[in-house]
Amino acid sequence: MRYTKLQSVVLVILRITIGWHFLYEGGVKILNPHWTAKSYLLDSGGFMKGFFEFIAGSQTLLAISDTANAWGLAFIGLSLIVGLFTRFSSLAAMFLLLLYYLSHPAFPGIQYLFPSDGSYFLINKTLIELFALLVLYAFPTSNMFGLHRLMKNNNSFLA
Amino acid sequence: MAQENQENNSKKISRRDILAGLAALPIVGVIGYGLLRNKAEAEKRNSSLLSDIKPEIQSGIPPLIEGKTLKIGIIGTGGRGGYLMKAMGFVNPDKIDEYTEKGKTDKYWVQYLEDFRAQDNLNIKITAICDVFDKNAEKAITAGANVHRNGKGGNMDDAPKRFTTYKELIASPDVDAVVIATPDHWHVPIALEAARNGKHVYCEKPLSWSVAETYEIRKTVKETGIVFQLGHQGRQTESYNVARSLIKQDVIGKISLIEVCTNRNDPNGAWVYEIAKEANEKTIDWKQFIGQAPWHDFSLERFFRWRCWWDYSTGLSGDLFTHEFDALNQILNLGIPNSAMASGGIYFFKDGRTVPDVLNMAMEYADRDLTLLYSATLASEKNRGKVIMGHDAYLELSDTLIVSVDPQSTRYKEKLKQGIVEPFKPIYSYVPGQGAVDAITSPTEKYFAGRGLLYTYRDGKAVDTTHLHLREWINCIRAGNGAQPSCNIDQAFEEAMTAHMGTISYKEGRRTYWDKEKEVIV
Ligand SMILES: NC(=O)c1ccc[n+]([C@@H]2O[C@H](COP(=O)([O-])OP(=O)(O)OC[C@H]3O[C@@H](n4cnc5c(N)ncnc54)[C@H](O)[C@@H]3O)[C@@H](O)[C@H]2O)c1
């Protein structure tokens, strides 16, 4: 299957904008030594609330999750932008987004301290970004546009 | 797709490939630029806000002074008396079992019990108990014996002795110091008796029920030299001390108005407490409950809900305003106001009470050029917080502390103009246990700080302020060098007189004044 020109351009734009979002979010967190997800985690809701509060309550777990989160975001973002390991990073990104969603699910009846920027029922922007990543996973573009194209042994691991 | 891969593999790398392969790299550069800009701005804000202030933050819990085991007597072992015993390390075994049971479904109680067990042993022994209601006395006796903080069936030590009158308790050689947690009209008579017998006193707030006795207790405590602590545990609240140091450094500018409030909206909050089924004329020494109050026939309502009648109570002013006042007196050394004006009424709880359920008081500090405003209702929970309003910023206080900038500030004029600070937005926050004052930069932090919710979690090691307050008192007793704790008799005198000025103003429907020279309310 070959994409039409329009299809490729659209897919590459999607890949780079999502990558941009991830890299910037990760970068800001890495560069701010005081950043922590603690208050966000404490504000969790839904059936996984206890789990996220447990992480927030433990110094060690919180430190691990903060570091993994910040660097995870940055690497995923970088990978999507430069077009290397994009299938793997799409999966990792979906996993992170799933955690964000589960900590603040858009379930009816849950009130969060941190106000939401719109009105959502089950589906919110986190989930939409997650599905957009699924599109990237299903329609890879790094072998057309990205470092992957330059790799001699063009195997799917690098895709 | 496999086909495409094969095609790519077979090709040599062309110029086109290189372009398409590297075209995205400049985007990384753009984001890098964005990140550095963001960091530089955050640093600019942080350093310019925090560079010129040095908040004083107490580090850790003051160590216990060593010495012999203190023998303590508790007089009045109702709700507060029970709590004070817990803060000293003594809880009824039944209660321990209750915490354990509740912990099975609610983790909060697991932590609660853990915190209690982790609380330092103050090296004291509860040797004596006095309460006029049998049930409360008996509960305190079993709690006093529970030295090892066990549940039922656990190992217990000697039970404290029950005395039927406070005078006998105070006279006992087995008592070095007393904790007084009776209704308000009994505070001074008992404290006087203790001081005259050389026993140290921890007395619950408010200091006094009448104006006259306030002078007497101050005089006696000073003459006898006993160690005296009034039970405003707010003295130990870290955020108050931090507020004090920030204000000293002129972070909020000239203060003109302070607003404090009480907002409650349930029968318990309005002092309509439950009446114990064990209570009757046989189990309660009614005559001793009455004491210096005007005689009234036996009444369970009056015994359990004594705060509703002036006969035993000091009303909203003495019961609840005093906590607010003492916090501010600690932060600002306010002292007694020049004048007080109060109004209010019994607007919601028309249950035969004589004390108002709505009270508003304006206290003027002419020499400080500021007004202290207290506003209370027992029929709405809309909390208005504790706010100290300065020309440059306002400081809001609870367990946490938040300073927000006034748009018309002189001090922050330049920073406002440069966009380093935003009007009405928090610039400093302090959260107990965090150990540092933070300049607030990110929108998330601003949001949480603005709601006083940053880290308000039961975070493992929350220490009970009442424990710290008692500990300070005990340390002073052991030090034996004449040092008095933070809420000493002078602070207590100011607290009581200020509360009385408001109450008299309310009762007489006029403005009351404090004559500083003669130290009288006119
Ligand atoms: N610092 C605080 O945060 C705080 C909190 C609650 C209460 N308090 C203060 O504690 C005091 C007690 O309040 P409470 O809520 O425990 O009331 P309460 O009615 O629950 O307890 C008072 C106890 O004193 C006993 N008593 C009455 N007269 C006595 C006497 N002559 N001798 C011995 N015992 C006597 C009663 O039988 C009762 O057990 C009040 O002055 C109140 O202002 C302070």
Image (cartoon, helix red, strand yellow):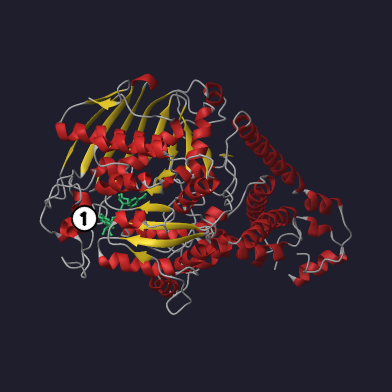
Reply above or below: B346 against A46: above
**Residue B386 appears left or right of B512:** right
Question: Which of the 4 quarters of the picture holds residue B38?
Answer: top right
**Percent x, y of residue B442:** 56, 42
Q: Is residue B118 left or right of residue B174?
A: right
Residue B399 appears anywhere in the view:
yes
Q: Amino acid at mark 1?
A: Phe
Q: Secondary structure at mark 1?
A: helix
Image quadrant in which the N terminus of chain B is located: bottom right
- For label 1, being within 8 Å of ligand 1 is answered yes
Q: Is residue A31 above or below residue B501?
A: below
Q: Camera-side residue: B254 or B500?
A: B500
Subunit ID for the residue under disc 1: B
Q: Which corner quadrant of the image does residue B49 belong to?
A: top right
Image point (31%, 65%), residue name: B137
Q: Is residue B262 visible?
A: no
Instruction: Find disc 1 in the rendering and name its residue.
Output: B289
Q: Residues within 10 Å of mark 1 (few under 14, many from 20)?
A: some
